Image (cartoon, rainbow, N blue to C red):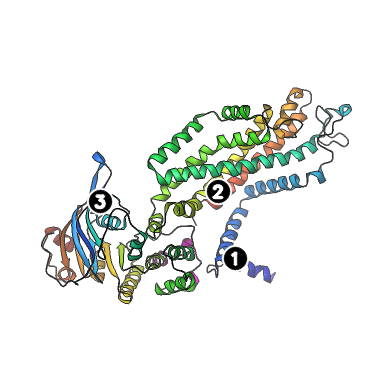
Amino acid sequence: MVGRPKCERPVVNMLEIDNLNVWFGKHRDRVDAVKGASFTVGQGESFGLVGESGSGKSTILRAITGLAPLWSGGMIVDGQPLDHRRKRAFFKTVQMVFQDPYASLHPRHSVDQVLGETLHLHGFSDIDARVVKLLDDVGLGQKFRFRYPHQLSGGQRQRVAIARALAPEPHLLLLDEPTSALDVSVQAEILNLLVDLRASRGLTYLMVSHDLSVVGHMCDRLAVMKDGEIVEVLAVDALRAMKASHPYSKHLLEASL
Amino acid sequence: MAETQTLRQWLLTDTPSSRRHAKLSAIYQGWLSFRSNTMAMIGLWILILLVLVAFAAPLIAPHDPFVQSLGNRLAPLGTEGHVLGTDSLGRDILSRLIYGARITLYIVALVALIAPVAGLLVGTVAGYVGGWTDTVLMRITDIFLAFPRLVLALAFVAALGAGIENAVLAISLTAWPPYARIARAETLTIRSSDYISAIKLQGAGPLRIITKHIWPLCISSLIVRVTLDMAGIILAAAGLGFLGLGAQPPSPEWGAMISEGRRFILDHWWVATMPGLAIFTVSLAFNLLGDGLRDVLDPKAGE
């Protein structure tokens, strides 16, 4: 990590990533997607990962959730070190919202089935009441409960995906460019919803984005990634004041103006 | 009229009020799009007719299909009391066709139950689990695919003895590999999708993912493929019957009937032609139905 600025950090860490390497393929086909990434996210903090496409931002999220099985290094979530198998209890702590709401909902499952199955898998018994509450929480009414994904707009689908991620009552929410597939007007709605949910539920966010203004709106601190490496971690205030120290971060800042 | 109008509106609503309502509404919309396909409706009607005929065979058949009358053998079309003529033993061809519909349905139903289910199981497990399991299961599939179908069925029937059940088993044995291939290909595209990742993140195990998330998406393309293959299955059963390895005489199986009529085909063409026309009609009906179902069931064909 280069030039980490001093900034206020909560005492308890929700997520600690230490020298994480993630790769795909074996032997000669091996592609290193993330190289020696280290950062920490405090409890209740909102942390952003920015960088261009292919810089390994999403891969870090997939490694945390176990969807990218080939990794080395240390990952500690809520005080628990992770090994290569994820237990069901892990998914009660960590949940993820995917980038494309058109791809992240099963085309043949209604909203009720999606949320009901999630609640069932996490062992809740009062499923009906919880489905109703979840739909209200994400700003979808009762009338959406029995609809299928093709009867919903992109923004509505992403609300369903957020409701699904909230169903197990997680502490850490991983957001993989949650608004990049949506219209600009809908983007603002979803971002505001996420801000409200974080405030009301005390969530910790790890958010991936290529949009600096989104990260500036949502996050307290951010890490800039390039070619699988974290080049700089800086506070959002420093971002706003254009005080990036690494040349690539400066370049990114200037490009986003 | 007002009531039917509200029922229609209830079914076409954009905001279903219950689980059952949403299901019924989805089914009704599928039915509407199926109904607009005239050819598929023709196929459906032919098959409904076939089922009715098979069920009501004792009521509508003019004669007993097994009663011989050697004095009246090889009567031509339009003979008094024998609209489609009689065969070499003087049995009424129309009655035999009507009873034969039962056998055809029996074969079709059994094969449709065995082959696609076996293929779905093998294909989705191979596709989802991957690795060694995939290699082993798919090489077995390849071996079955590489075998000439009728030869394998012949060998199987020859080993187990001729008869309609063994013919069905033999046909199923040769029919499942293509379904396994389709199911595996579908599974490979589905398993890396975000909604499968999402359900994995809820802690779902492979069994739940395969049965509840992958099967519903594979089944529609399999159903279409099965209806399109039905014609081939009927023909294979007829072929086995024709070769004397399927249904045994005096059973009125359509293929066996053609086989019997073959000896007289030059002078008494209707004996072989009538069962041939029946096979043709039912095969065509299944093909038309399959085309229509593809439009309705294919999840990728737009919303």
Nearest the viewer among B76 and A104 is A104
Q: Are marks 1 and 2 on the same chain?
A: yes
Is B45 part of what is drawn in magenta?
Answer: no
Look at the numbered disc 1 and give the secondary structure of its residue: helix
Q: Is residue B252 left or right of residue B287?
A: right
Query: Which residue lies at the image location 27% right of the left edge and 49% below the top edge?
Result: A70
Which residue in the structure is indicated by mark 1? B11
Query: Which residue lies at the image location 62% right of the left edge and 66% below the top edge?
Result: B8
How busy is the neighbourhood of tag 1: few (under 14 within 10 Å), some, or many (20 plus)? many
Is A150 part of what is drawn in magenta?
Answer: yes
Look at the numbered disc 2 and give the secondary structure of its residue: helix
Total marks shown come to: 3
Residue B37 to residue A121: above or below: above
Q: Percent x, y for residue A139?
A: 41, 73
Question: Which range is magenta?
Answer: A143-156
**Mark 1 — on which chain does it sit?**
B
Q: Quadrant of residue B139?
A: top left
Which tag is nearer the camera, tag 3 or tag 1?
Answer: 3
Which residue in the structure is indicated by mark 3? A71
Q: Is residue A147 left or right of residue A235?
A: right
Which three-letter amino acid code belongs to the residue tagged 1? Answer: Leu
Q: Are marks 3 and 1 on the same chain?
A: no
- In the image, which disc is placed on residue B294? 2
Nearest the viewer among A211 and A3 is A3
Q: Percent x, y for residue B13?
A: 56, 67
Which tag is nearer the camera, tag 2 or tag 3?
Answer: 3
